[in-house]
Image (cartoon, rainbow, N blue to C red):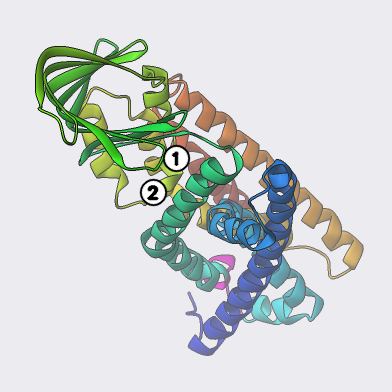
Amino acid sequence: MKSVHPTLSIYLGKQFVAAFFGLLGVIAGLVLLFDTVELMRRAVSSATMDFSQIFGMALLKLPHTAQATLPFVVMMAMMFVLFRLTRSHELVVIRSAGLSVWQFLTPPLAITAMLGLINLAIIDPLAAGMYDSYQRMDGNLIRGQSTTLNIGENGLWLRESQGPVANVVYAATVHQDKGVLQLSQVSIFQTDKKESLARRLEAESGKLVEGAFLLDKVWDIVPGKTSIFRDTYSLPTSITMNKVQVSFAAPETMSFWELPQFIYFSEKSGFSALPHRLYWYSLLASPWLLCAMVLVAASFNLTASPQLTGWMARGIAGMGMGFLLYFFSRFLYALGLSATLPLFLAAWAPAALASMLGVAYLFHREDG
């Protein structure tokens, strides 16, 4: 088997990289435009937001949305490269030199795998942090959330507004037991209208029940007054176990490197980490999925006619297959979230299916 000349590999790689980043820039621009318009529509009722804040939120959301479009960008980039090489008859020359389809596709596949790993290790942590900032701004500025809840290895932090008064609750450790959130080493800070400390509660333990925090062995401390010890104390709250569970429902705000540790903490604390584990598996499968989209694009367009009409027919068919694979992956993801399908299978099946279809067809065309 002939080896691919380094000059040819570099040329094919440059063609693919240029097409990839060109299409990514176009799609990112469209996504930014649509997100900005949508945020402007949602922010109509907010008198405190200006265009700079709205555009900043759209920029914060952009990397996360762009990540979701990467399979389509890779597919369209490969289709564009094949179209260009076919129209200029360079592909005919390359194939006539005795190079197989596997040798021809090696540079794009290698670059795609490298891009997938870079996205996983470097881009995803940045995108997750920016998306977390976006969600916080969305909740505070647009949805007007009065409650902020965060649970992690550093314990529970909760800020809840009740009219002019606000409660800041901290618990060193949390654990869910039969639908009840158990807390230990609880500190509660109450602020007044001027956001000055008005009261402090220090409890040895507590639990969240319907409509209240039930605290045990509590010191009630008010500035300028004598501290009072109480065996039990009930602090009204609008926080429910359902809201606590919802606080875990944003795995996109955590990076690839943070997810395993968070999954371990959640399961150890008695919470379900199913969405986070499934999302982590899907991130692991993403480089393979990107490479599979190169094979799918080559299956539909490698032997396309130089005539524009013939190439367009194959291009439309290839894009149709890409959308079918996308909806298939979303369907399996939903089955995984509902625990109907094993998580590993729900995350890896789309990439495996796409790669097997591409490899099978290319083997048939090349060696069949």
Identified by mark 1, the residue type is Trp
| Residue 112 left/right relative to 274 | right
Near mark 2 (Cα within 10 A), the count class, few <14, some 14-19 or many ≥20, is some
Q: Give x and y (percent) for residue 59.
A: 59, 61
| SS at badge 2 | helix
| Residue 339 left/right relative to 38 | left
Q: Looking at the rendered structure, which numbered label has been put on residue 348? A: 1
Q: Looking at the rendered structure, which numbered label has been put on residue 284? A: 2
Q: Nearer the viewer, residue 142 or 222?
A: 222
Residue at image coords 68%, 52%: 35
Residue at image coords 54%, 58%: 60
Q: Earlier in the sequence, mark 1 or mark 2?
A: 2
Q: Can you tell which quarter of the image residue 28 is in?
A: bottom right
* Residue sitting farthest toward the front: 224
Q: Give x and y (percent) for residue 315.
A: 78, 57
Identified by mark 2, the residue type is Leu
Q: Nearer the viewer, residue 305 or 10?
A: 10
Q: Is residue 360 above or below residue 7?
A: above
Q: Which residues are magenta?
A: 98-104
Q: Can you tell which quarter of the image residue 325 is in?
A: top right
